[in-house]
Amino acid sequence: MEKWVHVLRIRAEHLEQADFLTVEREPSDVIAEALLAMPEGEIGGGSDWHIAAAERFAGSAVYFQIGRVQKVNQPQYDEGTRKFFEAEGERAPYTEGVFDGETQTCVIERRPNVAAKAIEIAPKLEKLLNSASAPAEAGVTIRVDELRDPTGFIEQIRDSYRVTRFSFTAEFENPHDVYGLIHRPAEEYNEAIRGAKTTVESRGDDLDKDVVEEAARSAASVGDPASATVKTEKGGKLKTIYLRGTPLLELVELADKADALKETMLAAAKRAYHRLRKPNNDT
């Protein structure tokens, strides 16, 4: 059965004031441990949210379920009295996800009653993961961001006559493969100066489109904003475009068997990240 999955980025950011007893650990290990702790808590709306059935597989990957338990009044029928009545019960809609430790991406099956939009499920997952003990013990906070498809932004860059300005915002250092030429140094600088975010801007008569695309894809891969000023044609007016795009989704054929489902979702996470970050690299 074909299903759409949301694509999220999960990353660990160092706390400004960490406990002196904190132990430096790989971010993907901290995230995996937080998932495996299966935290739970009330996250608005009167519902108790849970991470459940979490387990490691395929090395650094983690399969998990995420859902909510909500008390509801359900109409029932009593055969003895031959009357209908309201009785308190529970409903527990949930969905399934896989975290890939190699790319630090996560895919979650889109289900209307619990995960209709990435922007809705991402903050709930973030709060649950940070309620586990692993992040605080490692001196980090976990961030979960929806990823957006940069295709439209890149196409406008490619189709433009010239690019005269490009800027992106870097936040905390990300251990994964952000653009080494500028994105990683900007993150390192932002962390060293204890900034909340650092904006890098370049201006020129004709910026290199290949470098702009690489930097834009790097920003998109961690959910950071970017923008550019382009001239669509010779003698034309300048136009500002933004790296917003539509939420990144991946269509997958979900299997019925549990092991096949996990592997399929893991492959979808890797495929979506590869398509976003390095679409022309077939190696």
Image (cartoon, rainbow, N blue to C red):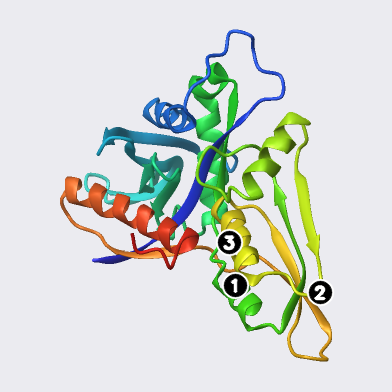
User: Pointer 1 and pointer 2: residues touching (CB < 8 Å)?
Assistant: no
Residue type (three-letter) at the residue carrying disc 3: Glu
Neighbourhood count class around disc 3 (C-alpha, 10 Å): few under 14, some 14–19, many 20 upward: some
Q: Which of labels 3 and 2 is toward the front?
A: 2
The x and y percentages for residue 17 are 71, 19
**How many angstroms separate mark 3 from mark 1 (CA)?**
10 Å
Mark drawn on residue 244: none
Name the residue tied to disc 1: 154
Name the residue tied to disc 2: 205
Q: Name the secondary structure under disc 3.
A: helix
Quarter occupied by the C terminus: bottom left
Q: Is 230 located above or below residue 42 in the figure? A: below
Residue type (three-letter) at the residue carrying disc 2: Asp
Q: Residue at x 67, y 69 (%)?
A: 208
Name the residue tied to disc 3: 214
Q: Residue furthest top?
A: 21
When asked about the image quadrant of residue 36, the answer is top left
**How many angstroms separate mark 1 from mark 2 (CA)?**
19 Å
Quarter occupied by the N terminus: bottom left
